[in-house]
Image: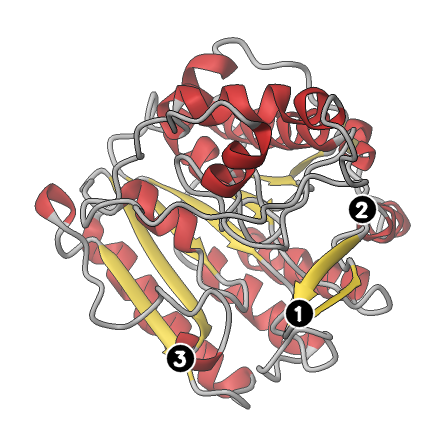
Amino acid sequence: MRIFYSPKQLAHRPVQFMMAGRLVEHLEVPDRCERLLAALRAASYIVETPREAGGADEVIGRIHSPGYLEFLRTAWDRWTALKNAGPEMLPNVHPYREAGEDFSPRPPPRAVSPIAHAGHYLGDLASAIAAGTWESALAAAHTALAAAQAVMLGEHAAYALCRPLGHHAAADRAAGFCYLNNAAIAAQSMRQHFARVAILDVDAHHGDGTQWIFYDRADVQFVSIHADPTNYYPYFSGYADEYGAGAGEGFNLNLPLTPGSGDAEFLDSLDDALEAIRVHRSEALVVSVGFDAHERDPLSVLKLTTDGYRRVGDTIAALKLPTVIVQEGGYNLDTLGKNLIAFLGGFNLATRL
């Protein structure tokens, strides 16, 4: 398995986010990468720095709208030009109109103020933009593309250590610590080589951005195991009756778990997820892996153990598909590396059997 990581991802250093009415210290910090890297190197994995992928702009542009990409690229410079601008770009207004039922991107706002654009393109108070945000988000996308390229060239599996994470980022909206949707970008790239690609999301939170991007497509299936969103972020998607639309009807599967669910319940749902991927006749797989379902994670309402993550990796590997693994959440710095090594160990062991 090849491992990719760009140190440019450390440039994003958010300070605060909103939780239940309070601005609290941000959890998606550079130290997450450093803990994961330390664990990889201690386990004798070789970590490669990705090269800028040819055609990257085109692939990213197939996932995200031009107006949104221009917003991300220029947001910080425009924000700092404001009189009395705060230390981070955060929205204080939101437009009433949202994406339609087909989840298509909205037209750019008529207002030109960066304050208006923050309200239009930032979906919550968890996705602040500061000096290094665009550089880090773009590096994360290139990291996912490098892993996808390795698999398309014949590697059975590759892991992309991506930060910021990406699965809450929609075609034209940042949310939930996410700016560019790394898993979606990897899947879109892999469509150059594979007729059907599946995305399996095993983060504690529903990957709403990924779902919306592919909701009306049959060539990229989205399957997600996550905590029940009735009382958990992202609240407004991730329900079992969301099946896809148009050409994508029947190719979207959500498997929400009751809070308190542990290894047994997660693995039971994983069996259902893998069966759906087999029915889809997927030729390749992208895994959005988050470790925030761990029993000690500060954002978790689920109870996975470290050994549970080993078993998840082992079970996914049984599909025997060319696989790109993309890092999503996980915020307990003491358990993050152990969970990653357990997951990769289970996956690698199964592929050798």
Distance CA(mark 2)–CA(mark 3): 30 Å
Which residue, given by chain and number where applicable, does mark 2 sit on? 33
Which residue, given by chain and number where applicable, does mark 3 sit on? 230
Amino acid type, residue under disc 2 in the picture? Cys
Work out whether 7 lies above or below 299: above
Q: Are marks 2 and 1 in contact (CB under 8 Å)?
A: no
Residue at the bottom extreme?
Answer: 260
- Quarter residue 184 falls in: top left
Of the residues tagged 2 and 1, which is closer to the observer? 1
Amino acid type, residue under disc 3 in the picture? Thr
Distance CA(mark 3)–CA(mark 1): 16 Å
- Depth check, front residue: 78 or 43: 78
Q: Looking at the rendering, in which quadrant would you find the N terminus?
A: top right
Q: Residue at x 24, y 47 (%)?
A: 215
SS class of the residue under badge 2? helix
Q: Is residue 108 visible?
A: yes
Which residue, given by chain and number where applicable, does mark 1 sit on? 19
- Depth check, front residue: 198 or 90: 90
